[in-house]
Amino acid sequence: MSFALAILENTIRIAKERNAWVIRKIRVEVGELLMINPEQLEFCFRSISKGTVAESAVLEIEIAKARVMCDRCGSKLNSPYTPCRCGGYGRVYGGKDMILKTVSMEVDDAQG
Amino acid sequence: MHRVEIDAQVNLLGENKRYAEENRRFLRERGIVAVNIMGAIGSGKTLLIEKTVEKMSDVKIGVILGDVVCRADYERVSKHDVVAEAINTGKECHLDAYLIHRSIRKLENVNLILIENVGNLVCPVDFDLGENKRVVMVSVTEGDDVVEKHPEIFRLADVIIINKTELAEFVGASVEKMEKDAGRLNPHAKIIKMDLKQNRGIEEWIEFLRGVMDVSGSTSRNS
């Protein structure tokens, strides 16, 4: 719920800065290691955005993969939770961020 | 009226990260060590804190207790000789750096801060509090597959405590499996097998804490 709230608060702030009257689409990138279920995130967002300028917005969620390399042989691994065949362990890069990428909104012709 | 697309590029965890860095600086400047104790409900986090306070009576300890609504843990810990702060998170299932930012300012005269996070093995892992060490505590009564089911929190732990080991045979759990899963997910973590009610494993935990405090020089600053 706190992630959905962060999306909503930031999109409303951006909409206010532009005097937008409705938000049409929000694109969010979610790191896979945050273990967020996109459907749940969207459900939470739907629930809390009611009555706001983001009520009818489409929420597009893109999962960003983490990069995992073996700390011994340097091979690329598919998961941070499974050791490499050489016995090494995964060193993880990324996959823990949540980025509000773009916000599409309707603004008056004098704006934007 | 027309449509515009704003290239926002806002890191939604950025604000938490900023407060975590402030917390880290606050703690470092005062030589305070902070330990974030995460774990499932009923795994033994509060008892671990009570026993730690008893065993480390020579150290000035502050305790932050995160719970969804009640103050039961706070009441328990407050009976000991510590400065305790309760945080009720309401609907949120984790502590965050902002909540800690407010609480640690009331604990600036201690050497060691023990933070009891809200009981669950999912959300707390995503929120850096600015702590020195992360601890995850589980017990055999949660089932011996509890570690493999929650890989991320164990991957990022400095210490993994497996508690209630004396009950393993009665609940059909394998401590060895839990230990093996923990080692596979995180070869760098210290694993402590513990039975708090029997006082088993507690000395190893205290030794770990004293080691962390020695490295950070915290005992020389506020004592």
Image (cartoon, rainbow, N blue to C red):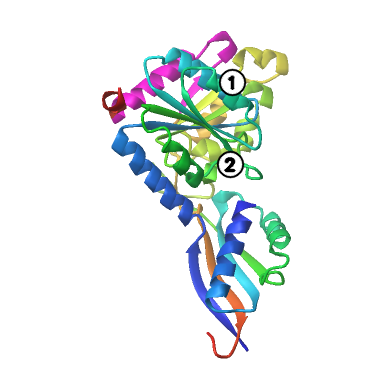
What residue is drawn where x is 66% and y is 36%?
B69
Q: Amino acid at mark 2?
A: His
Dot 1 surroundings within 10 Å: few (below 14), some, or many (20 or more)? Answer: few
Report the magenta residues as a range: B190-216
Disc 1, SS: helix
Indicate the position of residue B31 as horizontal and vertical percent values: 31, 32
Q: Quadrant of residue A18?
A: bottom right
Dot 2 surroundings within 10 Å: few (below 14), some, or many (20 or more)? Answer: many
| Dominant secondary-structure state across the stretch colored magenta | helix
The label on residue B76 is: 1
Q: Amino acid at mark 1?
A: Arg
Residue B95 falls left or right of residue B205: right
Indicate the position of residue B116 as horizontal and vertical percent values: 53, 31
* Mark in front: 2 vs 1: 1
- Chain label for disc 1: B
What residue is drawn where x is 71% and y is 13%?
B170
What residue is drawn where x is 39% and y is 18%?
B207
Of B116 and B110, which appears nearest the observer? Answer: B110
The label on residue B94 is: 2
- The C terminus of chain B sits in image quarter: top left
- Chain label for disc 2: B
Of B143 and A57, which appears nearest the observer? Answer: A57
Query: In the image, are marks 2 and 1 on the same chain?
Result: yes
Indicate the position of residue B29 as horizontal and vertical percent values: 29, 38
Residue B54 falls left or right of residue A30: left
Indicate the position of residue B24 as horizontal and vertical percent values: 37, 42
